[in-house]
Image (cartoon, grey):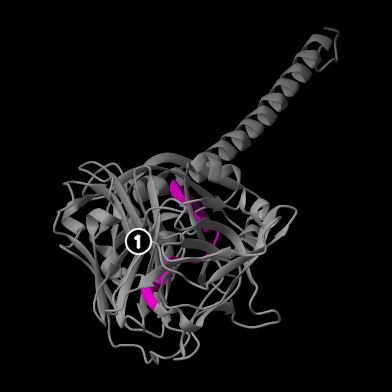
């Protein structure tokens, strides 16, 4: 160091280096602090979604029966009390249906943040096609053949009735014809004699009038009705038989188009008894398909979707509109998600529920075999005011679909004015297995074994009320009550929880 120098060159370089190191450490410390703060914030937000799902899925709520009075619930949870570790299906439904009442509790769980829940629950999709639900318009009803009528209820060329299927057995020869070969017969013949003992079955494709013109004993059946006609010989003692023989002037003619029968015409009269059955739903097709939650998620079709958002005025809003929820999510700088694949315990025994093609009225697994003396009962509050002489004789009460293991069927409940009875018709396989149960003028009962013929202990059973006549007061129940006979069916459920903060 020379005389008069304050710092040497080495000292100045050391000072510069020290300043640079201090600055770098300070900047690094600030960045690290920001990163740690960001990480803590993310962890807190992630914990909100995870913790909220844990509370919902792993606790039954307080009180445990909070679904009976949601407005006074202390805490909500959807864990099953009967089968711990699974979700109670009815509590899951209540979480959605009682959202407005329990929204403040749910927002506490979300620590004041906005949230949305999507639940994808395994389910049976049931559908019907190919016609109307089963009903019986004529049940082996006998008409005098002297003025037999079989015609379109309206329109031109009323005698020609459009059909979609046909089967004929001619007496006394026993020769049979179907839609596949009957046109070849009428290619060289104008008419076919329907002598006593003959049988005709057609599925009409339009509203059709059937009966006796002279005494105005007429009935109109709807399209897709299966009509069976038996030509029986009338004996001198007034009785009838279907052994064949005798003579009849009743004749059948069929119009064809490219070897396909498209309409039939019955003409003539005779000293015969024409016995007719007319039933709808014989060709109804019932299909069921089990859908797993992953497929519902891929299709973005949640079983339930709902949320709660905070408004600018400090209040909260229960919300099910996905567009409103999405708009709130998009306005947030962050969105955290948590999901769980879990098991839902589903048991339903509630025949008073509104009609629905998706929500069952009976659903579960049989704890015991169905009692052989058990019945499904439908009582009507009164008898419908239907003129027995009217051509419109059937009042439909309700439509059901039933399922058991690999079995499905459709059932129609109806009142028939000509019989003055309530009936229950069950159609399983199209074209066969059509069973009818008759009650009295106000009620009918169906054996539980007929509803679920394949069911045994451990079997899955279900019933959907597709439609109910709201003009008729109906009381539906089972004898005995099926609740003690059923255990919950355990099914997969995928649940997503989205948490964000628009503010």
Q: Position of residue 142 (x, y in %)?
A: 37, 76
The tally of labels here is 1
Q: Position of residue 439 (x, y in %)?
A: 24, 74
Question: Does the magenta segment cover residue 124?
Answer: yes
Q: Badge 1 is on which residue?
A: 243
Quadrant housing residue 5:
top right
Which residue shows up at 65% across the image and 34% down it?
30
Which residue shows up at 71% across the image and 55% down it?
187
Q: Position of residue 54 (x, y in %)?
A: 37, 45
Residue 332 appears in view? no
Q: Position of residue 47 (x, y in %)?
A: 46, 43
Quadrant containing the N terminus is top right
Which residue shows up at 31% across the image and 83% down it?
420
Q: Horizontal placement of 63 versus 255: left or right?
A: left
Q: Horizontal placement of 49 versus 130: left or right?
A: left
Quadrant housing residue 351:
bottom left
For the magenta stretch, what is the residue range?
A: 116-142
């Amino acid at each position: 160091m020379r005389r008069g120098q304050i710092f040497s060159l080495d000292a100045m370089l050391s000072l510069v280096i020290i300043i640079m190191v201090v600055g770098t450490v300070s900047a690094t410390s600030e960045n690290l602090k920001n990163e740690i703060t960001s990480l803590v914030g993310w962890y807190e937000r992630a914990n909100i979604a995870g913790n909220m799902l844990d509370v919902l899925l792993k606790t039954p709520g307080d009180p445990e029966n909070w679904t009976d009075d949601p407005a006074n619930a202390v805490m909500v949870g959807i864990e099953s009390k009967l089968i711990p570790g699974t979700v109670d299906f009815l509590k899951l439904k209540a979480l959605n249906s009682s959202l407005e009442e329990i929204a403040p509790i749910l927002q506490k769980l979300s620590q004041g943040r906005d949230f949305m829940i999507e639940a994808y629950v395994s389910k049976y999709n049931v559908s019907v096609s190919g016609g109307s639900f089963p009903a019986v318009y004529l049940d082996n009803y006998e008409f005098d053949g002297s003025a037999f009528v079989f015609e379109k209820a309206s329109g031109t060329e009323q005698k020609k009735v459009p059909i979609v299927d046909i089967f004929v057995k001619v007496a006394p020869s026993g020769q049979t014809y179907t839609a596949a070969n009957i046109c070849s017969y009428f290619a060289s013949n104008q008419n076919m004699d329907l002598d006593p003992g003959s049988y005709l079955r057609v599925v009409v494709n339009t509203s059709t009038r059937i009966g006796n013109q002279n005494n105005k004993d007429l009935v109109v059946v709807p399209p897709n009705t299966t009509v069976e006609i038996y030509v029986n010989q009338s004996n001198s003692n007034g009785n009838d038989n279907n052994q064949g023989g005798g003579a009849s002037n009743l004749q059948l003619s069929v119009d064809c188009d490219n070897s396909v029968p498209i309409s039939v015409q019955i003409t003539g009269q005779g000293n015969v008894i024409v016995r007719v059955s007319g039933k709808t739903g014989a060709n109804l097709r019932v299909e069921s398909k089990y859908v797993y939650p992953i497929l519902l998620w891929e299709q973005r079709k949640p079983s339930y979707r709902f949320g709660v958002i905070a408004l600018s005025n400090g209040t909260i809003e229960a919300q099910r509109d996905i567009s409103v929820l999405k708009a709130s999510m998009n306005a947030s700088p962050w969105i955290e998600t948590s999901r769980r694949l879990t098991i839902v315990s589903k048991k339903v025994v509630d025949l008073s529920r509104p009609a629905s093609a998706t929500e069952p009225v009976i659903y579960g697994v049989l704890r015991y075999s169905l009692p052989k003396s058990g019945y499904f009962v439908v009582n009507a509050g009164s008898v419908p005011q239907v003129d027995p002489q009217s051509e419109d004789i059937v009042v439909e009460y309700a439509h059901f679909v039933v399922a058991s293991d690999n079995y499905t069927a459709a059932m129609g409940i109806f009142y028939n004015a000509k019989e003055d009875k309530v009936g229950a018709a069950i159609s399983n396989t199209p074209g066969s297995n059509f069973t009818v149960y008759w009650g009295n003028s106000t009620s009918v009962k169906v054996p539980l074994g007929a509803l679920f013929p394949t069911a045994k202990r451990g079997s899955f059973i279900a019933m959907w009320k597709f439609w109910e006549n709201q003009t008729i007061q109906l009381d539906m129940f089972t004898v005995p009550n099926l609740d003690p006979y059923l255990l919950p069916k355990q099914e997969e459920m995928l649940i997503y929880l989205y948490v964000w903060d628009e503010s």
